[in-house]
Image (tube, helix red, strand yellow):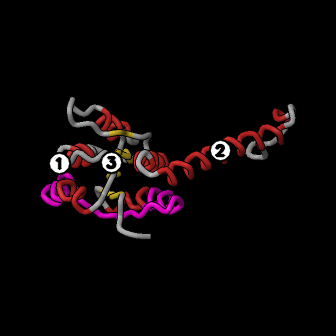
Amino acid sequence: MGEPVVGIVLGSDSDLPLGREAARVLAEFDVPCEVVIASAHRTPEKAGRYAREAAGRGLKVIIAVAGLAAHLPGVLAAQTTLPVIGVPVAAGTLGGIDALLAMAQMPGGVPVATVGIGAAKNAALLAVAVIATAEPGLAARLVQYRKGLAEQVEAKDRRLGGQGWQLEEGQA
């Protein structure tokens, strides 16, 4: 598929399921990616180096997956001008709310685009959209993807046939 253009950085190996989900979506669009583990707290030098070197290696977007204190996206964003997309992980006693707030409440000048808790699919789609601004072919594929989503909704509506309230959950 070529050299990676999206870096998926996991704060821990426990974040791998979300990393895989993002990688699968990127693969659907033939967007090459790499997946690495770099902790903002346990390996801060590695995380900073990864971000500083990312653009020089051809990356266009970084997706950072982290839970709890979730400083990883901010640490990466502070070391690069590439777009950084944070994916908060549902973990701990707050179920990911702490991670979401840590990512969303970045200081001015160091933005992190943040998707919903566990929303690795949306992070990957956002990365595709960013890259598609410079690649018309990819933009066209993203348009087709969205049309497909709309068609799925319309098909479900047709199956309801005005009497959907009578169907069992999941039958539409």
- The correct choice, above or below, for 165 with respect to 8 in the image is above
**Residue for point 45% across, 56% down:** 22
**Residue for point 45% across, 60% down:** 31
The circle drawn on residue 147 is 2
Q: CA distance from mark 3 to mark 2?
A: 33 Å
The circle drawn on residue 79 is 1
Residue numbers of the magenta segment: 20-49
Dot 3 crowding, Cα within 10 Å, few <14, some 14–19, many 20+: many
Instruction: Name the amino acid type tagged 1.
Output: Gln
Q: Earlier in the sequence, mark 1 or mark 2?
A: 1
- The correct choice, above or below, for 72 with respect to 154 in the image is below
Q: CA distance from mark 1 to mark 2?
A: 37 Å
Q: Earlier in the sequence, mark 3 or mark 2?
A: 3
Q: Is residue 112 magenta?
A: no
The circle drawn on residue 141 is none
**Residue for point 41% across, 64% down:** 32
Element type at marker 1?
loop
Decide if residue 171 is on the left or right side of residue 32.
Answer: right
**Any part of residue 118 in sight:** no
Camera-side residue of 128 and 169: 128
Residue closest to the far bottom:
1
Of the 4 image quadrants, the one containing the N terminus is: bottom left
Element type at marker 2?
helix
Residue 172 sits in quarter: top right
Q: Position of residue 143 (x, y in %)?
A: 58, 45
